[in-house]
Image (tube, rainbow, N blue to C red):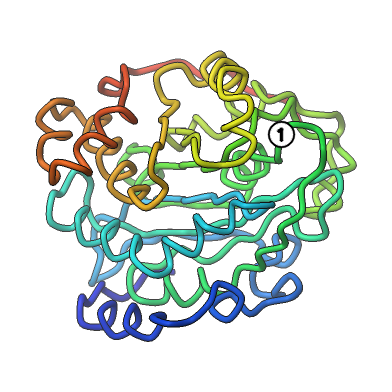
């Protein structure tokens, strides 16, 4: 997918249609949409086209449990336009193809993973709006942020990597600690895949890192992060190091994602932070932390 091109006029009309509508009205789904069900998804593809000849796959996996519905809401109203238009303007990568995911808890939620197509035009927003904000989650201090890693590794095909050897980008976003991994029974229930064994978080990171740059955005305004931020940061930093981004203002998620891509691609961190307006610059600078350019790494084979 992703055969069309972004049109700012389409976004302006779409964003205007969201004004005055509640989150419940904007996200009207009350169950998992068949089109977003990972059991039905097969392979999600980001392919080059005449409109996007050098596509770059970008996944935004959003926590939709509890209070985290605010992330999807803000992205649908404001953030997607900033995300796509700033990538097109700044050009840290070429021809963005964006997939959105909804993330819950594989232990107890009915829809712990939802996956749109990769798209390059206003269909990104239209499919984002089909997410079910289940508002579930359990009392285990983590959500299944590892399901996007599994799905990206096993159920996406991206030309940026297959044709050009350039990784895509995968950002998970939420306020809780990292999960320990996926049970084989959870994988089968959510995706239909039959595995020989359970997979640890490090297994899943190794799998997804072969084709994607992985980042996690900690939403500091979330209820769990407010109560246990040191534990959240320690857990994520142990797994992803400098690719853990602290988001002090959830309305600046798009700017933080764009900035992280810029720095990862080799641009100066201070210059990137300073390129935004003052209030946004402060949020971006804090989020980028110790982030530096990508370095080559060797990733082992994970037996499934």
Residue on which the image places disc 1: 142
- Give the vertical position of 37 relative to 102 (above or below): below
- In the rendered structure, the answer to whether residue 253 lies left or right of residue 190 reads left
- Give the vertical position of 41 relative to 153 (above or below): below
Q: Position of residue 302 (x, y in %)?
A: 67, 24
Most foreground residue, 271 or 197: 271
Q: What residue is rendered at 34% in x and 30% in y?
A: 287
Most foreground residue, 108 or 33: 108
Q: Position of residue 16 (x, y in %)?
A: 32, 83
Quadrant placement of the C terminus: top right
Query: How many numbered markers are drawn?
Result: 1
Dot 1: few (<14), some (14–19), or many (≥20) neighbours within 10 Å? some
- Give the vertical position of 68 relative to 239 (above or below): below
Quadrant placement of the N terminus: bottom left
- In the rendered structure, the answer to whether residue 45 lies left or right of residue 136 reads left
Q: What residue is rendered at 22% in x and 37% in y?
A: 262
Q: Position of residue 166 (x, y in %)?
A: 33, 38
Residue 256 sits in which quadrant?
A: top left
- Of all residues, the one furthest to the front in this rendering is 227
Disc 1 on helix, strand or loop? loop
Q: What residue is rendered at 63% in x and 55% in y?
A: 64
- Give the vertical position of 57 relative to 111 (above or below): above
Residue 261 sits in which quadrant?
A: top left
Most foreground residue, 12 or 139: 139
Most foreground residue, 201 or 291: 291
Q: What residue is rendered at 33% in x and 65% in y?
A: 78
- Of all residues, the one furthest to the right in this rendering is 185
- In the rendered structure, the answer to whether residue 142 lies left or right of residue 240 reads right
Q: Position of residue 115 (x, y in %)?
A: 60, 61
């Amino acid at each position: 997918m992703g055969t069309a091109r972004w049109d700012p006029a389409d976004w302006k009309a779409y964003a205007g249609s969201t004004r005055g509508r509640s989150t419940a009205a904007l996200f009207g789904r009350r169950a998992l949409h068949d089109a977003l069900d990972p059991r039905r998804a097969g392979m999600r593809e980001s392919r080059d086209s005449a409109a996007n000849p050098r596509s770059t796959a970008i996944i935004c996996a959003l926590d939709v449990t509890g209070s985290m519905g605010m992330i999807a809401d803000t992205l649908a109203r404001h953030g997607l336009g900033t995300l796509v238009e700033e990538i097109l303007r700044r050009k840290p990568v070429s021809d963005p193809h964006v997939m959105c995911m909804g993330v819950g808890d594989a232990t107890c939620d009915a829809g712990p993973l939802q996956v749109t197509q990769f798209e390059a035009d206003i269909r990104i927003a239209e499919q984002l709006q089909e997410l079910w904000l289940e508002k579930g989650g359990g009392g285990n201090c983590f959500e299944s942020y590892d399901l996007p890693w599994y799905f990206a590794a096993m159920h996406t095909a991206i030309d940026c990597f297959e044709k050009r050897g350039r990784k895509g980008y995968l950002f998970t976003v939420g306020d809780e600690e990292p999960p320990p991994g996926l049970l084989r029974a959870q994988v089968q229930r959510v995706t239909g895949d039959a595995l020989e064994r359970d997979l640890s978080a490090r297994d899943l990171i190794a799998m997804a890192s072969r084709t994607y740059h992985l980042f996690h955005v900690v939403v500091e305004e979330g209820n769990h992060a407010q109560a246990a931020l040191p534990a959240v940061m320690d857990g994520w930093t142990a797994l992803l190091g400098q690719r853990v981004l602290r988001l002090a203002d959830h309305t600046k998620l798009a700017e933080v994602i764009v900035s992280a891509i810029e720095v990862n691609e080799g641009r100066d961190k201070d210059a990137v932070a300073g390129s935004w307006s003052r209030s946004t610059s402060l949020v971006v600078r804090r989020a980028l932390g110790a982030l530096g350019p990508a370095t080559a790494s060797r990733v082992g084979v994970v037996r499934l």
